[in-house]
Image (spheres, rainbow, N blue to C red):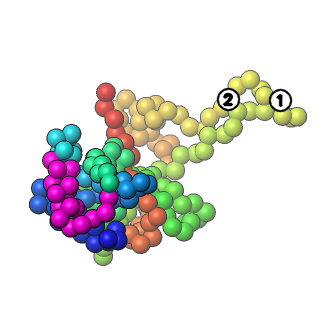
Amino acid sequence: MPVGPVQVVVEQALGGLGYELVELEFGQRGLLRVFIDAPEGIRLEDCERASRQLSHVLTVENVDYSRLEVSSPGVDRPLHTARDFNRFAGEEITVRLRLPLAGRRNFQGILSVEPDGQFGLTWRDIPAEPKPGRRAGGKPTGRAKTGQSSPASRAGAAGAPPDDTPPGQKLVFSLDEIERARLVPKLKF
């Protein structure tokens, strides 16, 4: 059974449990990986529940696989569909374009929903960090210089950006212009 029909079967089975299919992939030696998500997040119990249901459904549908792995998409969840982009509007994401724009394909910024089915990404260009200083002849100077300050010092005490922060730029795109997109992990310890 090709991936397309298997994907439909898996999406329907997961939808009945309140989960959404994020990705489905066939690995080596009969491995079938299924990544699931839900608005409240995914716990181990959710993966077990989905795995039990999918095992039964895939057997009934005669899907050829030998092992099934069900897991959450992780903290850097991929975004594939318009539904994903709408759900995560306002979050920080990374985007890789299929074709370069002004010599660049990778962008990171805040996702927004734009009119007429498009999406936006607002980012700030931060000057690239120069390589450690070198004297003529290629010998190191012994000190590295950076053209940027740390995020904490740029934000200032009240969290507002300082006056010298470059203004935000906006990229507007449609889904067919994207090679891949992912959430930027936000880890709290």
Residue type of the residue flagged with mark 1: Lys
Residue 23 falls inside the magenta stretch: no
Q: Determine the secondary structure under disc 2.
A: loop
Quadrant containing the C terminus in the rendered view: top left
Furthest residue in direction right, as rendered? 137
Q: Disc 1 to disc 2, how far (Cα)?
A: 13 Å
The residue carrying mark 1 is 139
Report the magenta stretch's main SS. Answer: helix
Q: Quadrant of residue 22?
A: bottom left
Residue at 32%, 58% in the rendered image: 65
Say which label, 1 or 2, has the lower sequence index: 1
Q: Quadrant of residue 64?
A: bottom left
Q: Position of residue 72 (x, y in %)?
A: 28, 47
Query: In this picture, which residue range is highlighted in magenta?
Result: 49-65
Q: Position of residue 177 (x, y in %)?
A: 45, 70
Q: Position of residue 167 (x, y in %)?
A: 46, 52
Residue 144: give its label.
2
Query: Within 10 angstroms of label 2, few (less than 14), some, or many (20 or more) residues?
Result: few
Q: Is residue 89 visible?
A: no
As drawn, is 40 to the left or to the right of 98?
A: left
Residue 10: give its label.
none
Residue 64 falls inside the magenta stretch: yes
Q: Determine the secondary structure under disc 1.
A: loop
Query: Within 10 angstroms of label 1, few (less than 14), some, or many (20 or more) residues?
Result: few
